[in-house]
Image (cartoon, rainbow, N blue to C red):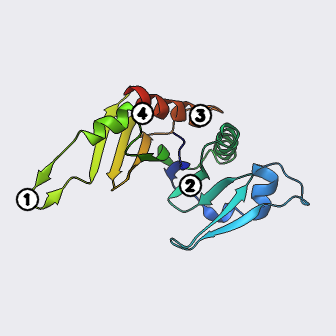
Amino acid sequence: MQPVQVSTVIIGSWNPRIFTPKWIKTNLLGLSDSQEVQGMVNFEEMDFGFQHQGVQLFPKANLLEVKFDGYDEKKAELASMTIIKILELLPQTPIKALGVNIRYVLNKKDAIPFVSSINQIHCKFGEFELNQIKQTSLQKNYQINIISDILENNIQTNFNFHYSKIAPFEINFINKHFEESQKILKYGN
């Protein structure tokens, strides 16, 4: 039960012009001029970004996204360190919200409580069939939203840990939410 992608989105008033390759290399990642950072283009949304050791950074005017494919504790720590450094270097940036998104593709035959509970839901109205379920749980400082798209052979599930304001970001922030998503999938809480 490994995620296919993990991302952190910080909604705010960002200035993407700050995020030049030189600024990212020297100020954000602490790399020398001889070391390279890979540039990226998301053609679907015409976003420009950067990648270092499998962690991708996409700065936009209204949000900053840091993501990586699959799940790896070291990548999660690098992503967290990158976010911590950005918040330290740009403390004047107005921030409205923060979200950690963890996306899974679960086989409908997986013997875990989450999949079993989704498979038990049968709802039909006329010719319409249920193909998406959204579940929400309010926690002390954040809200968990789980959106599951029910397909023929699998269930594509996205966990969104939503903070309505910036939360104290630490090195294990993403890892803690990954562990929480795993616990929910396996035990329901």
Where is residue 145 shown, x and y percent of the image?
36, 41
Tag 1: amino acid: Gly
Alpha-carbon span between mark 4 and mark 2: 28 Å
Residue at 75%, 63% (x, y): give it: 38
Against 67, residue 42 (above or below) is below
Are the residues at dot 4 and dot 1 in contact (C-beta closer than 8 Å)? no
Secondary structure of the residue carrying tag 3 is helix
The residue that disc 4 covers is 185
Mark closer to the chain start, 3 or 2: 2
The residue that disc 2 covers is 64
Residue 24 in the figure: left or right of residue 2: right
In the image as oriented, which residue stretches furthest toward the right? 34
Q: Report the label total.
A: 4
The residue that disc 3 covers is 175
Mark closer to the chain start, 3 or 1: 1
**The label number, if any, that marks residue 126 in the structure image:** 1
